Structure formats: C-alpha cells, structure tokens
C-alpha cells in the first residue's frame, strides 16, 4: 500500500519499478539545532567562596607568586563568616573543586567570644588572628601536637613566624562544639582546625602554598 501511494494514480504499482525518487521521504527531516557552546565554569561557586574574596585571594597569589612554590591549590580563610560555619576553604585551582573546614580565630580578635572576628592584629601578645597572605612552611610536633609553621608575606602578618602563628588541631575546633556552644572556641591567633580534620588539611596544604585570611 505504501508503494502504491508513492506513484501517480494513473500508473499501476505492478507495471512500474520503484526508483530511488519514489523512496525519498515526502519532506526532508528537520535539521537539528546546533548545540550551544559550553562555557567553562568559574574556579569556585559563590556558594563556596564569595567572588570578592576569591578575587582578592587570586590577586594576592599573583602578587606573592615568587614566594609561593606551589600555585595549584590555595587556602582561603573567610573571616567574615562566624566560627560556626565551615569557612576555611581549600580550593584546587586546577580542577575547581574545593573542601571547607571549620577553623577557629584568635581570642584577641573576639574578646567577648561572640563567634565573630572583630579585629585583626599583627602584634606580639595580641592573641589575635592576622589578615593577609601566608605561605605554609615545615611541619613539626609542638605543644599542640602536629603543626605547620606559617610565614607572613604582608605587613599585616609579617610577625607570624615570631608569634608562632601556625596550623594545628584543637578540641575547641571540633564540630561537637557547635552542638554544645553554637560556636568554636578561640585560639591564640593560630588557624586551629578540628582534630579529625587535620590530616586532610595537611594533605591538601603541603609546604609552599598560600593561605589567604581576610574579612571582606
């Protein structure tokens, strides 16, 4: 029946051979629409690191590039966020992936223990968190157990080594502090992370990478 409909009504299908013309579709299939170009996504989502803070961190990485041996990953401490939020972001600048951890700020930065950083300081004895760019140095075992020394790269934190501002773990930075107190405890200016997070933080930081600490 389909072949009969493909030829004129005055010619019998039995007396005429079908040709390629007869087999051609009555109408051409629609041309598929071109696929839209896929635009590369930004390094991080604003839900992870706020864009203004990310821009400042990358600018700092460029400024101090010669003193930072490895530029594939960066740690960003968002001190605008309260200590109850995972505000220590480890960002892989190659893959765009990131992980975020709880981190405590110094008691001198939050004297009333509100959970919010109120001020930065670079002064010895201030027990305050410093702002600016740090480069991670060597590991050692001290009074806080496994720790990592930091070197301050800016005038706002160039006393970091002398003040023994380091990355270490502490019980008061564990997640269960949020259940009992709604905030973390305070350090003496160090980047104190949870005891269960230290190995992951050390594995991603390594030596010769930047930590950028700011309140934007």
Image: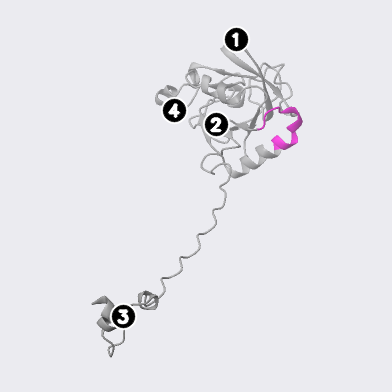
Q: Which residue is mark 2?
A: 116
Distance from label 1 to label 2 (Cα)? 29 Å
Distance from label 1 to label 4 (Cα)? 30 Å
Give the SS element for disc 3. Answer: loop
The residues colored magenta run 60-71
| N-terminal label among 1 and 2 | 2
| N-terminal label among 1 and 3 | 3
User: Farthest left residue?
Assistant: 1
Looking at the image, which is closer to me, 159 or 18? 18
| N-terminal label among 3 and 2 | 3
Give the SS element for disc 4. Answer: loop
- Asked whether residue 82 appears in the rendered view, the answer is no
Q: Position of residue 29 (x, y in %)?
A: 41, 71
Left or right of residue 178, residue 82 in this image: right
Q: Which mark is residue 182?
A: 4
Task: Say which of marks 3 and 2 sits in front.
Answer: 3
Task: Say which of marks 4 and 3 sits in front.
Answer: 3
Give the SS element for disc 2. Answer: loop
Distance from label 1 to label 3 (Cα)? 88 Å
Vertical position of residue 3 compared to residue 39: above or below: below
Labels 1 and 2 touching (C-beta < 8 A): no
Q: Position of residue 76 (x, y in %)?
A: 60, 33
Residue neighbourhood size for the residue with mark 1, other residues' Cα within 10 Å, grouped as few (<14), some (14–19), many (≥20): few
Looking at the image, which is closer to me, 173 or 76? 76
- Asked whether residue 16 appears in the rendered view, the answer is yes
Q: Which mark is residue 6?
A: 3
Q: Which residue is mark 1?
A: 141
Looking at the image, which is closer to me, 117 or 12? 12
């Amino acid at each position: 029946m389909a072949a009969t409909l493909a030829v004129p009504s005055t010619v019998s299908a039995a007396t005429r051979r079908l040709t390629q013309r007869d087999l051609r579709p009555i109408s051409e299939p629609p041309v598929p629409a071109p696929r839209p170009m896929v635009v590369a996504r930004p390094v991080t989502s604003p839900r992870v690191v706020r864009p203004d803070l990310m821009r400042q961190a990358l600018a700092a990485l460029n400024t101090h590039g010669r003193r930072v041996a490895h530029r594939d990953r960066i740690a960003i401490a968002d001190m605008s966020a309260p200590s109850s939020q995972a505000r220590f972001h480890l960002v892989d600048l190659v893959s765009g992936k990131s992980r975020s951890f709880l981190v405590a700020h110094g008691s001198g930065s939050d004297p009333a223990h509100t959970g919010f950083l109120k001020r930065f300081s670079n002064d010895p004895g201030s027990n305050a968190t410093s702002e600016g760019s740090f480069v991670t140095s060597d590991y050692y075992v001290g009074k806080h157990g496994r720790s990592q020394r930091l070197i301050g790269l800016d005038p706002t934190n160039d006393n970091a080594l002398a003040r023994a501002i380091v990355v270490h773990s502490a019980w008061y930075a564990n997640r269960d502090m949020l259940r009992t107190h709604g905030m973390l405890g305070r350090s003496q200016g160090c980047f104190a992370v949870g005891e269960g997070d230290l190995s992951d933080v050390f594995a991603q930081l390594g030596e010769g990478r930047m930590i950028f600490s700011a309140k934007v």
